[in-house]
Image (cartoon, rainbow, N blue to C red):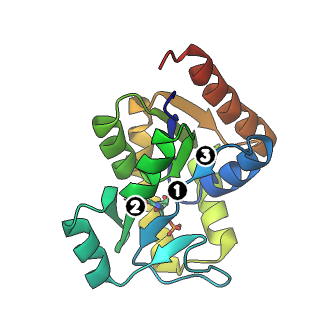
Amino acid sequence: MKKGLLIVLSGPSGVGKGTIYSHLLKIMPDLTVSVSATTRSPRAGEKDGVQYYFLDREEFIRKRANGEFLEWAETVGNFYGTPKAPVIEKLENGKDVLLEIDVKGAHQIKAAYPDCVTIFVLPPSEEELKKRLVGRGTETEAQVKARLELAKSELSESVLFDYRIVNDDLDRAVREVADIINKIKGERKC
Ligand code: 5GP
């Protein structure tokens, strides 16, 4: 059986990766997404096992030591990681899996799985990214500042990705991601 395609959607916090992938699922219903683990606290409306598996630091560190993560990163004070077993199982069963992760995690995945496709989502401008981060109102002023600082260094790494798209128009960005996935799938032999 043909293995599934591993797709990494990355880019700075607030760039709209989550919105892109939720719209992508509507036009690519066979795509599966990985639910990450994190030590950050749930935001209003977030449920354990849906947006994330919410773990305390001890539990995260234990799982990390057990090799239960495909990749992990510490970003703006919290740990984030991709649970390994469900992703491997889906890929083995021929299902395509999308990871929505930060830039550090994306590099780890590319190093371990060179056949994966990495897509970097760019904001239309740094000013627009700031507006979105402030506008969603889920972070304190200090957290927004930390995320923006990190975004600057992440943006400089976009050249290391297989593809770059600009999220200035949601429909177009979603279509571009879908086109990339379909193109790679069409070219793959195994
Ligand atoms: P947030 O706290 O806004 O949900 O996520 C913060 C950042 O962590 C985002 O850039 C998001 O893509 C990233 N992230 C979410 N899950 C993972 C993961 O499993 N691994 C890594 N490396 N980053 C993740």
Q: Nearer the viewer, mark 3 or mark 2?
A: 2
Extreme left residue here?
65
Residue 83, numbered label: 2
Give amino acid for label 2: Pro
Q: Is residue 10 visible?
A: no
Give amino acid for label 3: Pro
Give me the residue at 40% from left, 61% from top: 83
Please say if 52 is above or below 175. Answer: below
Nearest the eye: 30 or 78: 30
- Alpha-carbon span between mark 1 and mark 3: 23 Å
Secondary structure under tag 3 reads: loop
Q: Which of the two labelled residues, at mark 1 and mark 3, occupies the earlier sequence position?
A: 1
- Alpha-carbon span between mark 1 and mark 2: 8 Å
Nearest the eye: 157 or 81: 81
Give me the residue at 30% from left, 62% from top: 68
Secondary structure under tag 2 reads: strand
- Name the residue beneath numbered marker 1: 34
Instruction: Decide if ligand 1 comes within 8 Å of the CB at mark 1.
Output: yes
Instruction: Decide if ligand 1 comes within 8 Å of the CB at mark 3.
Output: no
Percent coordinates x, y for residue 27 in the rendering: 79, 41
Q: Which of the two labelled residues, at mark 1 and mark 2, occupies the earlier sequence position?
A: 1
Q: Is residue 82 left or right of residue 46?
A: left
Give amino acid for label 1: Ser
Q: Are marks 1 and 3 in contact (CB under 8 Å)?
A: no
Residue 123, numbered label: 3
Q: Quadrant of residue 186?
A: top right
Q: Are marks 3 and 2 in contact (CB under 8 Å)?
A: no
Q: Are marks 1 and 2 in contact (CB under 8 Å)?
A: yes
Percent coordinates x, y for residue 91 in the rendering: 48, 41
